[in-house]
Image (cartoon, rainbow, N blue to C red):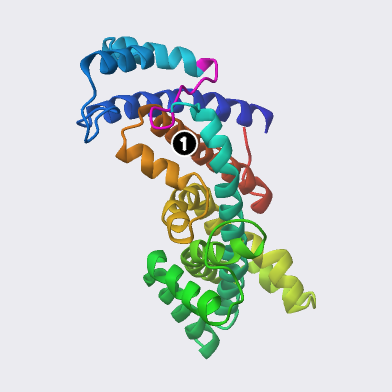
Amino acid sequence: MGRFLLRRVLQLVPTLFIIVSVSFFVIRLAPGSPFASERALPPEVLRDLEAKYGFDRPLLAQYGTYLANLLRFDLGMSTKYPQMSVSEIIGLGFPVTIQLAAVALVWALLIGVNAGIIGALRQNTAWDHGAMAVAMLGISLPTFVLGPLLILVFALSLYLFPPGLWGTWRHIVLPGITLGTVYAAYIARLTRGGMLEVVRSDFVRTARAKGLSELLITWRHMLKGGLLPVVTFLGPTTASMLVGSVVIEKIFATPGIGPYLVDAAFNRDYFLVMGIVLLFSVLLLTMNLLVDVAYGFLDPRIRYE
């Protein structure tokens, strides 16, 4: 296990290098300038700004400087928010985004896994058809439609939760459910498919022959094998939730990292865009690594060499 983890961690370095390099040059290919606005700046002011951020140098020199600063964990200064560094902006918005994604993930697992188990154990019954019909509805309903519907019903009609902003636990319920529902639908279908593959396995029949209860068989024997597709899905899904929270944070006006990313893209804030892309990339690669490790605990046939 130790060698496997070391090898995988070392593989992250060239992967991140490629992501950073491609992102750096692709962003710079976009037309316009970070200092472009409706009111043209005087030439001397524009020269001073470009010199301050290093944009007056050749592109390869800028790239080399950015990599050198990155090795010192310096993500640079924002051009949209010149009084703040990229690290400070991420430090402000990311905790809110990670809380929102965590609630959405718990909701997705709670609803999706249980719906998938019910569908598999009650295959081709009304329970199965009902659970999968709800799952298809969750997949088909976009978050920008579900979010306003939840606000209309639970905030503006029933007054159970606030319609937006951030503060107490009540502010996170509606955006968390909105973000997690579509993933709950996918998890339900994956859980059902995985459970159906093991429900008639030899070890399940052996467990039944020993007189074990159905509940014990399901949770101790069937669920480990049935959750393998879900575990595979959770790696990119967790990172996708963080990226997908951009829309949710706009709908519910939560102070996460999403609004900063949108503003950075529109204002060509190169360093802030790069910082957020790098953050999401590290999270995606880390989650994929955790998924590989989790395989060994769920399936005893998997060995790390």
Q: Residue at x 28, y 12 (%)?
A: 56
| Percent coordinates x, y for residue 151 in the rendering | 49, 72
Q: Is residue 41 left or right of residue 70?
A: left
| Percent coordinates x, y for residue 85 in the rendering | 50, 26
Please, is residue 186 above or below residue 127 in the view?
above
Please, is residue 174 above or below residue 228 in the view?
below
Q: Residue at x 49, y 53 (%)?
A: 241
Furthest toward the bottom, the residue is 126
Residue nearest the viewer, comparing 139 with 233: 139
10 Å crowding of disc 1: few (<14), some (14-19), many (20+): some
| Percent coordinates x, y for residue 92 in the rendering | 57, 39
Q: Amino acid at mark 1?
A: Ser
**Prevalent SS, magenta region:** loop
Q: Residue at x 37, y 14 (%)?
A: 52
Please, is residue 136 above or below residue 272 in the view?
below
In the rendered picture of this protein, how many numbered marks are placed on residues?
A: 1
66 drawn magenta: no
Residue nearest the viewer, comparing 19 with 96: 96
Q: Is residue 100 something one can see in this rendering?
A: yes
Q: Is residue 77 left or right of residue 220?
A: left
Quadrant in which residue 174 is drawn? bottom right
Residue at mark 1 = 281
80 drawn magenta: yes
Q: What residue range appears in magenta?
A: 71-81
Q: Is residue 227 something one can see in this rendering?
A: no
Q: Quadrant of the N terminus?
A: top right
